Image: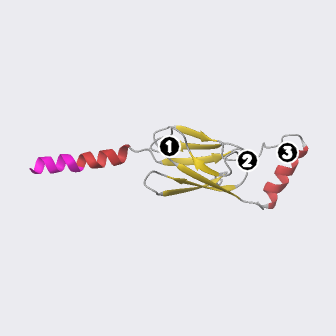
Amino acid sequence: MRKLLVVLALGGCASMAGSPVPQAARLSADVLTLTLSDGTTCRARWAEAGGAGRFDNCGPGFGYAVDVVENPNLLHQLFTGLTQALGAEGAVPPMAEVVITDATGRDHVFVSPPPADLSDD
């Protein structure tokens, strides 16, 4: 009986560990790219969907919501204006908070673009 309980307990842990979890979310002007812990990459046309939706055929099922920062910092505004003036409309991704909701209802929150790592490692 003990062996059966140990096997069941380990099996339960293995199935939990097998579900991929969101590791990164990045935006372009119109596409949200989600990277999962198992290496899977999923894409959704977030702007076309109005900023919220679901990833089709991606892992166990993930919802997403994109909250664009309407007034980003001055440097981002200047750089975006410069690229637009040079004819590269949409080349600079928007600044946003991206919330990925997994099948259990747990939210995974990311910012895009991700913050720069300025540490001296």
C-alpha distance separating marks 2 and 3: 11 Å
Q: Is residue 121 visible?
A: no
Residue segment shown in magenta: 1-9
3 and 79: which is toward the camera? 3
Q: Are marks 2 and 3 in contact (CB under 8 Å)?
A: no
Q: Amino acid at mark 1?
A: Leu
Q: Position of residue 95 (x, y in %)?
A: 71, 54
Establish if 72 lies above or below 79.
Answer: below
Residue placed under numbered mark 2 in the picture = 93
Residue placed under numbered mark 3 in the picture = 83
Q: Position of residue 79 (x, y in %)?
A: 83, 51
Q: Are marks 1 and 2 in contact (CB under 8 Å)?
A: no
Residue 31 on the magenta span: no
| Most frequent secondary structure within the magenta stretch | helix
C-alpha distance separating marks 1 and 2: 21 Å
C-alpha distance separating marks 1 and 3: 31 Å
Q: Amino acid at mark 2?
A: Pro
Q: Is residue 8 visible?
A: yes
Helix, strand, or loop for circle 3?
Answer: helix
Establish if 100 lies above or below 43.
Answer: below
Give the number of the disc on residue 36. 1
Helix, strand, or loop for circle 2?
Answer: loop
Q: Position of residue 101 (x, y in %)?
A: 51, 54
Task: Mark 3: give few (<14), some (14-19) or many (20+) Cα within 10 Å.
Answer: some
